[in-house]
Amino acid sequence: MNDIFAELSWRGLINQTTGDDSFGSWLNEQPRTVYAGFDPTAESLHVGHMLPLMLLRRFQAAGHKPIALVGGATGMIGDPSGKSAERNLLSVEQLRANVDAIKIQMRQFLDFDEAGSGAVLVNNFDWMQNFSYLDFLRDIGKNFPVNVMMAKDSVKGRLERDDAGLSYTEFSYMLLQAYDFVHLFDKHGCTLQIGGSDQWGNITAGIDLGRRMRSAQLFGMTCPLLTKSDGTKMGKTESGAVWLSPERTSPYKFYQYWINVGDDDVGKCLRFLTELPREEIEALDKSREEEAHKRESQKRLAESLTGLVHGDQGLMVAQRATEIFFGGEIDDLNDQQLNAIFADVPSQQLSRDRLSAEGGLSIVDALVEAGLSKSKGDARRTISQGGAYVNNRRVEDTDKSLSAEDLASETVMVLRSGKKNYALLRFAS
RNA sequence: GGGGGGUUUCCCGAGCGGUCAAAGGGGACAGACUGUAAAUCUGUUGGCAUUGCCUUCACAGGUUCGAAUCCUGUACCCCCCA
């Protein structure tokens, strides 16, 4: 069994643990069963979920048994931790669909098949749905002093705000999460819960409950939240969250997100999210200091994470797309490859006759049809300023006309305006 | 109810009756530079076309050879006095 504690320490992944000094040795004593919870708020995981998933993965690699708990029940309530306002409740059907989709994605991170330390996926809806309110109050609620609950940061924070209240439902959230821990202890011998630092209150609530109900010694550990140096959350772009599902965020965009991580944040990302060994990460730190322009850290980060989430195939497409998007001429590609690479790019269907008509298709019209220019004048302007490209080759002649010879593949032509505005024209016959 | 001011091209904002498609700034787009960063610099920013033409300055009319600029009415906004 590897020394997971030491591993997590140097990566900076330990924010707080219970048991203080003894925690590390307790962990390394024997294989433990550890759990982390995930809110099924959407039908895909996003970048924000990667940190706890990687944590579980590290535990598994070190010989421990991970449990991923999907909050089918708690998702119906909404965790007030770190939230400034009351949460919207999700419908049962929506939750069920989300849970199913999330399960599949987790397989990329955790091995569910291994004999001893095989991961387990549980849904707290399964044991909560038939728990009657009266029973819950008698058996669980009885163990929670309200004054202690009120002192938790997650609750206190919300009570102190004038503009956002806290419903009884959300107030009760921690009881559910606390009971989850006890339940997992009963059923799976789970003795450790991990989560982000905002989960500390919920985790200790579970530990307290375990002691009261089972006289059990449970443990908790939190990791820092993955934030950027400017304080904002990792994994957000102007266009929204960065998702793990290729339908929502293409492998190319996913790759690009990491390539563009700022110098100040990339070291943290490498430590928190990748499994690169210490020596390599420190070498990258050095490279970043001495030859920042090479951006080896970002490349390595993007490569590592894209490979993990989208597989070798996805990584390849993302890298090929990157090459092309940033200058490479487009040759020797067929429709299928182009479609994979330009999956995110808008496209327009045009009749093939347009190419063979006498005079061909003017570059100006092509830019307008592709939606890259809003008028012919605009298109001319773009061309004369040197901002128009066909298949990544600059077009300087405003009067250029395009024919079948300008197709990048069987039926596709790649137009570009400026550095990164791409559009495809498809000429199906 | 009375008096005054306003409504301009994506936004803010200038605009003598002709030389106004309309200053300036912002934004946006393009180019150079660069680390797919930031900053900076340059150019462009109503439409169509080879000089040129067409449509815009709240809306509808009018005066003029000619109006975003003058007059009348309409709508909305702001301020002051009751």
Image (tube, rainbow, N blue to C red):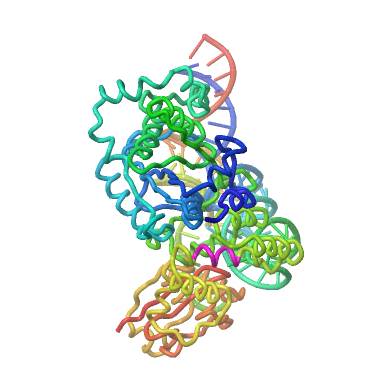
- Pick whichever, B51 or A327, lies toward us: A327
**Closer to us: A329 or B71:** A329
Q: Is residue A240 visible?
A: no
Question: Percent position (x, y) of residue A321?
Answer: 50, 73
**Residue A48: x and y, percent?**
49, 49
Determine if residue A6 is in view: yes
B57, above or below A392, in the image: above
Secondary structure character of the magenta stretch overall: helix
Q: Quadrant of residue A275 in the image?
A: bottom right
| A227 on left or right of A404 | right
Does the magenta portion include A43?
A: no
Q: Is residue A335 above or below residue A284?
A: below
In this figure, what is the number of numbered marks?
Answer: 0
Residue A350: horizontal and vertical position, in percent? 35, 77
What residue is drawn where x is 44% and y is 40%? Answer: A191
Q: Is residue A399 left or right of residue A70?
A: right
Nearest the viewer among A344 and B64 is A344
Q: Residue at 44% x, 52% y: name it.
A: A46
From the top left corner, tell me how far across and down residue B65 is, in percent: 52, 57
Residue A299 sits in quarter? bottom right
Q: Nearer the viewer, residue B75 or A56?
A: A56
Farthest residue to the front: give it: A29
Indicate the quadrant containing the C terminus of chain A: top left, top right, bottom left or bottom right: bottom left
Above or below: residue A384 compared with residue A145: below
The boundaries of the magenta stretch are: A299-306
* Residue drawn at the location 47% of the way across and 17% of the way down: A147
**A302 inside magenta stretch:** yes
